[in-house]
Amino acid sequence: MQYLIEIISFFLILFFPETTTLLETSAAPSTHMQTLSAIRVIDGDTLKIASSESTLTIRVIGINTPETKDPRKPVECFGQEASQKMTELVQGQTVTLIADPSQTDRDRYDRLLRYVELSDGRDVGEILIREGYAQEYTYNSPYARQTIYREAEQEARDNQRGLWSPDTCPGYAE
């Protein structure tokens, strides 16, 4: 089947070069949506996923959690809790990875940039933000779920959840 797709793609590109972008998108479905097993949480916004070929390191698009693994920094306030929540949500679970065409495929550390959804369809990034374990984070450009994530952060702030509680990390809430 893959061979047939490659032949068709070749002829389409040859005779209709404007379809190249469309073919890159449709010929590589793994870059847009994959359902795989989460095998290890690195921290609150990064995890390892098992694919048939290798282990992938995933950085969740649109969120940032306090650092726990950066050797140049001490463990930040609420970092352990954010890592624990990510572990509770995904460790050993089948998750769906979703690319965002508005973002690059990988970050500067060569981690795949993806949204992560649970088997019931819930968005891991949104859960972490809404419950106060993460903040909305825009790296270079707006992303598809930015409005949802910003609203989730505002709700967490308004309700003083997690990071935004005055008792959790004094001075964290801006």
Image (cartoon, rainbow, N blue to C red):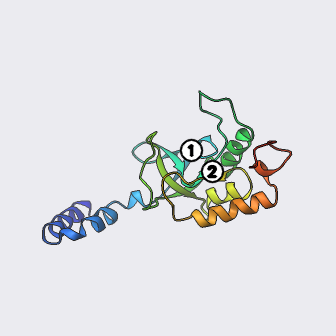
Q: Which mark is residue 168?
A: none
Above or below: residue 74 compared with residue 107: above
C-beta proximity under 8 Å, tags 1 and 2: yes
Number of marks in the rendered image: 2
Q: Say what amino acid the circle numbered 2 marks.
A: Val
Q: Nearer the viewer, residue 81 or 33?
A: 81
**First along the sequence among labels 1 and 2:** 1
Above or below: residue 114 compared with residue 65: below
Q: Say what amino acid the circle numbered 1 marks.
A: Leu
Residue drawn at (74%, 43%), measured in percent from left and top? 81
The Cα–Cα distance between marks 1 and 2, rounded to whole angstroms, is: 9 Å
Spot occupied by residue 157 in the image (x, y as percentages of width and height): 77, 57
Element at badge 1?
strand
Q: Is residue 62 toward the left or the right of residue 29 in the image? A: right
Residue drawn at (18%, 66%), measured in percent from left and top? 13
Q: Which mark is residue 47?
A: 1
Spot occupied by residue 129 in the image (x, y as percentages of width and height): 68, 56
For this orientation, the residue located farthest to the right is: 167
